[in-house]
Structures are given as structure tokens and as C-alpha cells.
Image (cartoon, helix red, strand yellow):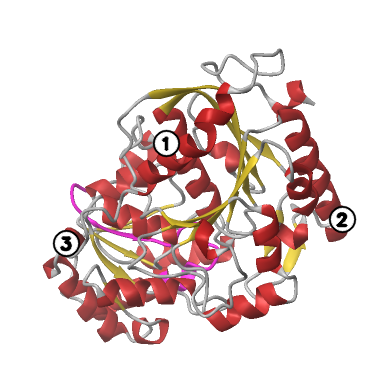
Amino acid sequence: MVTQTKRLEHVRILMYSHDTFGLGHLRRCRTIAHAIVERFKGVNVIIISGSQIAGAFDFRARVDFVKIPSVIKLYNGEYSSVGEYIDLEDILEMRKLIIQRTAEVFSPDLFIVDKEPLGLKGELLPTLQMFDNTKTKTVLGLRDVMDAPQQLEKEWESRNVLEHVVELYDRIWVYGPEDFWNPLQGLELPDGLEDRLRYTGFLERELPSHQIGEKNAAYLPDKYILVTAGGGGDGSVLMEQVLAAREYDKNSDFPIVMVLGPFMKTENRDRIRNRASRLSNIVVLDFETRMEMLLKEAIAVVGMCGYNTFCEVLSFDRKALFVPRTTPRQEQYIRASRARELGLCNMLTPEEAAVPHTLAEALHKLPLMDRPSLHLDDHALEGLNTICDEVENLLSSHSKDIPDTARRSTGDEPNQTIESLI
């Protein structure tokens, strides 16, 4: 948790979040950006995001975002443009040009890239190459778990990703403890790359300054099990499995709150609501941007073990049952399996959760589990502090060398909009 306030004079940080499926990348970037401006006065942050709903979230003063055209990642791993009559190649070209122009005008001291080293379909390469041999420091931020080694190797090898990372990045931050998982394990790392790795620890979450929306708050019971699937794009299966377990277990009526997520298909959303209406003590919410508030009041969580949900479970010390997706990526399955191994949660495979009596039994046991804090290392949630220390190390001397010219903002006011910069 960030507590100490310092000043970095006239520093600009640009972040990139490609955002093609779900909410994880934007929420992680927003969390990091908020921690940085809380620690350092004089820093302004802009997040480049492809999320369709970036504007639904609150951003602190000195944190702003630039919306690039959205591209949807389908469940089979392919990409599609949001606009029915807009060619995908045209969308990708627009994204690349907006990113590059934003970087040129904003002229950041630090560029932080979330998860995709070269950007979607290589859209970051011109911008990264532009920063080469300049004062702009470049950082690649990786989740604690990326994917199964063989899948990641296949994905990266054809594009020479690791060679580009060595050429174009000053640091690689891993958003997890070193003893939890190595996201690059099994890969043959080029010389010099391992020296740039920094394990930060998990990103601890705090309660937002505003309460959850009044509409959602009106329906909440005092205590409940929270069922969440992040953005909800592929979360309907988990929701219906929980409903099937409740239908099977006639004696259970402990309150359940389901958050469907903004990307769940309408037909799935309607089916879940209709099914839940026939059961007692089940509240179904469409979406909530302040998930931390919902999680704080829950006695336990059922989820898929996406990175943000996992960090929230650890941050608020909530008992958890995870049913991770296993295709097209193994990320959630690896994270949940490792967390169960360490005593931090319980886990069922999707096939196990599809058996109503198996899931019903796991739900019964959920309140009796240990809290994760009993098995969690004291420094496991130091990610935001470590990142802020890294930012200071990378930029403190650099920022002092830059004169206070007209191109720099005052640093303590909200960012200008991108329209005023271009």
C-alpha cells in the first residue's frame, strides 16, 4: 500500500493497455497509475486503452486515458473489429497511428506496456523504436502468469518477441512474487534479459473513495458469496454452474450476489436472470465498476482466477473458490492451481464444476476454509510500493535534468485531454 508522498518534477508517464478481451488490462494499468500519482506529486499519467468501456471508470486527478478503436478478441483467439463495416486492417492502422502520435506529442519520460511486448499485431513497434536512444525509459509489465510455456513460446517465437524485448525495453516487471511463478519459465531467454527482470509482488487493492452505485447497493444482502467472472465475456458458464448447484442443493439458501460483467451476451444474461429468479436469495447485478466494495462485504468469492480478482481476494483476505478457464489460455488454471498448492484458495476444473453435487459440496465448504492471509508471505502484496520505487529509481535523476519548458505541465493539475495535445 502506497503511503509516502514525494515529488518528481514535471514527469510524464505513458501506459499502454491493448484491451481486446475483458477488463483485466485496463484495471491493472489504472491501479498502477493511481498508485504512482498518489506517491509522487508532479507526475502526470496517460493510459492508452482499447477498452470499449474505459469511460465507465473513475480516474484520479493527473490520470487520463486516450481511447483507441476497439478490437475484440474472440474466444477462439482470433480478432474482429467492433464496427460491422470497418475492416480490421483499417482499425489496426488507426490504432498504430494514434498510439504513435500520442507518444510524440505527450513525450513521456516513462513508457509502461501491459502484457503485450509489441502491442496488438505489432502496433507498438514504431513507437518503441521511436523511443530508442532517447531519454524515455521503457518498461514491460507482465502478469504473474502469462500462459503455459509451450503456448507462449509458440506465440512469441514467430515474431521474435524476446529479441525485441532485449532491444527495446529497459526493465521487465513481473506483477507477482518470485516464489509464486515465473511467467517466462521454459523459454530460452536471450543474454541480458534476465538481468532486467524485477518481481514486484502482487498489486494490493484498496477501497475506492466512492461507494458502489445506489442502484446496485439497494439489492445487496448484509452477507453473501460473491460470484464474479470479470468482464463476463466467457463467464456465463460459471454463473449457470453455480445456479445448477443451488438447484441441486435444495437446503442451501445462503445469499449469493452474481455480477455478470459488461461483455456478457444478452441472451446469456437473460437466461441467467430468469433462472436465478426461480431461486431464493440470489441477486444478479449487470456490472459494477467498484468491485472492491462488493468484494469487501462478501464472506467469500467464486470466480475464474483472473489476475485482478485474485489480487482482490488476497488484498481483502477473502476465502475463494476458483473455476479457471483452461482454453484458449492456461493462465487462470496455472494461477489457481499454484494458489491452491499454497493454501490460498480452493479450485475446481470446469469439468468438475459442471457436476452440480460436486460444486454444491465445494460451496458448502467455502465458508469453512482458511483465509489466504494464513498462508501468504508478508511481502507478497508489495507490488505497488515496489513499482513506485522502480519509477523513482528510473526517473528521479532523469527528471531533474529536464528544464521546465513550455511543453511540460505543472504536474499537480488534471491532465489535458488528448484533443488539446494533438
Say few, some or many: other residues with alpha carbon within 10 Å of mark 1 (under 14 / 14 to 19 / 20 or more).
many
Seen as rendered, the residue at the extreme left is 368
Left or right? Give the position of 91 relative to 198: right
Q: Do we see residue 421 in this rendering?
A: yes
Q: Is residue 366 above or below residue 269?
A: below
C-alpha span from label 1 to label 2: 40 Å
Q: Are marks 1 and 3 in contact (CB under 8 Å)?
A: no
Residue type at mark 2: give it: Tyr
Residue 35 numbered tag: 1
Residue 128 point in image, percent of width and height: 73, 49
Q: Which residue is mark 2?
A: 85
Instruction: For mark 3, give the secondary structure.
Output: loop
Residue occupying image coordinates x 41% and y 39%:
389
Residue type at mark 3: give it: Arg
C-alpha span from label 1 to label 3: 26 Å
Q: Foreground residue, 266 or 15?
A: 15
Q: Earlier in the sequence, mark 1 or mark 3?
A: 1
